[in-house]
Amino acid sequence: MSFADLGLSDELLEAVSEAGYTEPTPIQAQAIPAVLMMKDLIGIAQTGTGKTASFVLPMIDVMAAGRRRALMPRSLILEPTRELAAQVAENFEKYGKNHDLKMALLIGGVQMGDQLKALNEGVDVLIATPGRLMDLFERGKIMLNGCELLVIDEADRMLDMGFIPDIEFICDKLPTTRQTMLFSATMPPVIKKLADKFLDNPKQIEVSRAGNTNKDITAFKVLVKPRQKRETLEWMLRNDHVETAIVFSNKKTTVRELNKTLQRNGFKSGEIHGDIDQSTRQQELERFKSGDINILVASDVAARGLDIKGVSHVFNYDTPWHPDDYVHRIGRTGRAGAKGRAFTFVTDADAEAIGNIEKLTGGEIKAFGKDDVRVELKDAPKGKSAKPKPAKSEDAEAKPDREDKPKRARAKKSDDKPRDDRPKKPRADKADKSGDTKPRRKYRDEDSEPVPAGEWNGPKPDFLGVGFD
Ligand code: ADP
Ligand code: MG
C-alpha cells in the first residue's frame, strides 16, 4: 500500500514524499480515505502510530476547496497541550507547503497579538488548546459557526486534564453539519459518550488494542526502595548505553529536584513540567532535540504525545498512577520502528499501580536483573569475577539501530562501574549467612516471579539487589 493509493492530491503526495514517508501506517491507510469521503471518524491507536498525519493529510485536501473568512476558522483541531498543538502545526506546515492554506495556532502562554491578527485575516485551520480557545470565544474574538471540520485529538488525555466540559461547550458552538474526528489511545466510557453525542455515524478504526505496547520497546520494571531511586537512575543512565532519555516523574517538584541533581552530577539534562512557561518549555525541547542535552526530566502533562525522535530510553522514575500514562510514557521510545528501552521504577507502595499497568498491557513486565545488564559488572567481591556479558537477543536487535546514529551529548563522568564505594547497609533478609551467595527473595506480591536461585553471582549496584536479595 502506498500513499498514492489513498486518494490524496498530487501536491500532497509530493509533500509527503519530501517528508520521507514511503508507506502509510495502518491507521493512516484506513483513516485517510474515510476522511476524504467526509465521514466522521473514531481512531483508536496507541501513541506513535502516526495519528497526526492520518487527519492532517486528508484535511489539507478537504480544506483546499473553499474560502477563508475573517474571524471564522474553517476547521478546528483541539489538542490537550501546547506542545502537541505546536507539533501538529509543524506537521501542517510540512505537508501543506504546496497548498495555499492559512493556519493559526491558539495556545496559552504566548502573546495573543499575532494569534488575533491571524484570526482577523481568516484561517483555514485553527489548532488550539481548549483553554485559550474558550478564552477568546468568551471575549467574542472568534466565531465557531463557520467551522465545518473538527478534530478532537488525544481525547483520553483531554479527559485526564479535565477538558471534557470545555470540549462539549465548543462542540455545541460548531455548526451541526460538520465532519468530526476523534483520536485517542484508549476509549474510556466518558470518551465513548462524547463520541456518541457529537459524532454522526462514525467509522471506527482500531489498529491495535488500546494498551498494547509497542513490540520495539523492551520494558523492565526495576524493583527499588524509594531512597535508591536517584542512585539507580544515575547508574542506569551511565551504564545502559543511554543516548537520549526522557525521565518521567509523577510530581513537578520531583522533576525540578531531579534535574538539578542530575546536572550537579555531570549529566546534561533539562526539565519540562507544567510550571515552566511556554517559551522555556519550547527552548528545553529544542535543546533536547538538537542534542545539547540528552536527558529530559518531564511530567506527564508536559510530555504527552511529544514526538521526539530517537529517544533510546524512557525511565519512569515513579510508577505512573494511571496505566494509560504508562503506555504514553514508554511510547516516547521505540517510535516509528526504532528500538527502545523503558524502565519503570517500582517500590513496594506501587504494587497496585504496577498491577493495573500489567493488566492493561496484558502481561507481567519483566523485572530487570543481571541478564539484562548491558555492561560488564566489575570488581567482584571475594575474588569472584563477573563474566563478560554475552549479547542478549534484545540487545542484538537494539544495538545496530543505535550505533548507526551519532553519539549525542553524554554525561561527562561515565564511570563504568556501580558506585559501591560507600558502606552498604546490611540487609535483614540477606541469605549470606547460610553461605549461599546466591540469595533468593520473593518479591512482594504473588504474581511476581521469584528470581531463580543462582541467577546473581557478581558485584552489582545496590538496586539490582532489590529483586534478588
Ligand atoms: P501519534 O499521534 O499516533 O502518537 P505521530 O503522528 O506523532 O503519532 O507520529 C509518530 C511518528 O511517526 C512521528 O515521528 C512521525 O513523523 C512518524 N510517522 C508518521 N507517519 C509515518 C509514515 N507513514 N512513515 C514513517 N514515519 C511516520
Ligand atoms: Mg498524536
Image: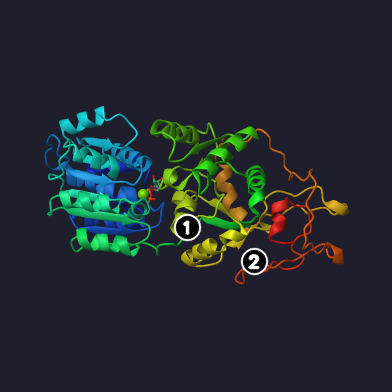
**Where the C terminus falls, by quadrant?**
bottom right
Tag in front: 1 or 2:
2
Is 63 drawn above or below residue 155 in the view shown?
A: above
Location of residue 177 (image quadrant): bottom left
Apparent side of residue 379 relative to residue 279 in the rendered image (left or right) = right
Say what secondary structure mark 1 lies in: loop
Return the residue at label 2. Answer: 444
**Mark count:** 2
Residue sitting nearer the eye, 341 or 438: 438
**Where the N terminus falls, by quadrant?**
bottom left
Confirm or reject: label 2 Cβ below 8 Å from ligand 1: no
Marking on residue 214:
1
- The amino acid beneath tag 2 is Arg
Q: Say which label, 1 or 2, has the lower sequence index.
A: 1
Name the residue at 88% across, 52% down: 383
Rendered location of residue 228, percent (x, y): 67, 50
Name the residue at 24% across, 35% down: 104
